[in-house]
Amino acid sequence: MSDTISVASPADFHVHLRQGEFAGFLAKHVKKGGFRLAYVMPNLKPPVMNTEEALLYKAQLQAVDPTVEYLMTLYLSPGLTPDEIRKARHAGIVGVKSYPRGVTTNSEGGIESYEAYYPLFAAMEKEGMVLNLHGEVPSDPASNTCVINAEVAFLPHLQKLHARFPRLRIVLEHATTRAAVELVKSLGDTVACTITAHHLALIVDDWAGQSFNFCKPVAKYPDDRQALRDAVREGHPRFFLGSDSAPHPPHTKSTATPTHACAAGVYTSAILLPLVAHLLDSFGALDRLEGFVSTNGRAFYGVPARADKDRITLKRVQGRLVPESWEEGGQSVVPFWAGKELNWEIVHDEQ
């Protein structure tokens, strides 16, 4: 078994970099974690709603680290028009992110029905923009829907959207269930799926009672995790990494009250490539690392690696502990896997 592995220009196709001073702290961690491309989510406060806001956000991130390639997205909302889609695409904005109302962080302005957005999707299909779907429906006691089955209940919406817009590129984000994996495989080449590092590690037992492992969508059953691992081990070209690294100040993760739950999201950016290598190694898929973290996603999005110099090399190690937290300038965040060992680390990082 090799003690080193090299991968081409890793790309994270789903990451939250927040805003303001917190973003200035976090954006540096994309590169620290081994990545050269960040597909940036728009659920800020207020959300990124138009071309000008997306370009301003991109400029703010570039001011922190101009060596990372940032692909920007817009927040699906009633104010978004086909004309704005065309304007955004011509400005280099890549996708539009759909959040069902109230299912995750800063989704209060999310959608309740897709039909109203059909003219928008038609424009996206024509312009070649990507529709990124948070694949859950809101919890509803009347229909027996909760966080455990919210993703499965969403899947008919994905089927309907693909049937109506077969040339629209759609990404089902952060899949957590066998049903989602099987559906994406059954659909056409314009439908892809991101898988997070933490969902390759977690099951229900790992987040029940452990706030720092709590995210949306929640990790599901062992068989669901196995389906995610099998998709990676198979090397299926339409499954690739989107970390959904979602940082929160530690006090919002570690506390809850009768009226406020702890924040949903885990933070992986600063350890991402070693973590993914560690996990893939653990279930016999290390030979799929480059496809999963680089080539599959880049091929789907049409963004090839910029240069051979962006190759990243990792080496096998023992006893390397993940820090309990990262802190800088009054900002802090607790990473996923804190205090645990990683068996891989980045050793060659040419610029």
Image (cartoon, grey):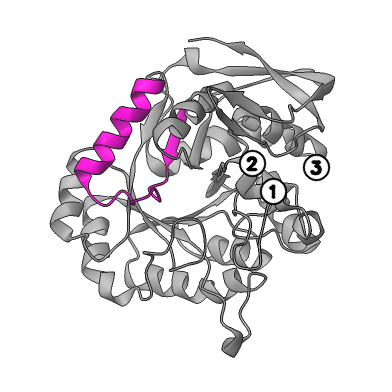
Is residue 22 placed above or below 188 in the rendered structure?
A: above
Question: How far apart, in angstroms, are the residues tagged by discs 2 and 1?
Answer: 6 Å
Q: Where is the N terminus found, in terms of image quarters? A: top right
Which residue in the protein does label 3 denote? 283
Return the mark for residue 254: 1
The residue depicted at 22 percent of the width and 59 percent of the height is: 80
Magenta region: which residues? 37-64
Amino acid tagged 3:
Phe
Choose mark 3 or mark 2, whichever is in front: 2
* Percent coordinates x, y for residue 46 in the rendering: 33, 51
Asked if the residues shown at circle 3 and circle 1 are in contact, with their CB atoms under 8 angstroms apart, the answer is: no
N-terminal of the two: label 3 or label 2?
2
The residue depicted at 51 percent of the width and 64 percent of the height is: 135
Is 308 in front, or is 197?
Answer: 197
Does residue 9 appear anywhere in the picture? no
The residue depicted at 77 percent of the width and 64 percent of the height is: 221
Asked if the residues shown at circle 2 and circle 1 are in contact, with their CB atoms under 8 angstroms apart, the answer is: yes
* Percent coordinates x, y for residue 330 in the rendering: 55, 27
- Badge 2: residue crowd in 10 Å (few <14, some 14–19, many ≥20): some
- Is residue 2 left or right of 301 when viewed as pictured? right
The residue depicted at 28 percent of the width and 41 percent of the height is: 54
Which residue in the protein does label 2 denote? 250
- Is residue 108 left or right of 265 when viewed as pictured? left
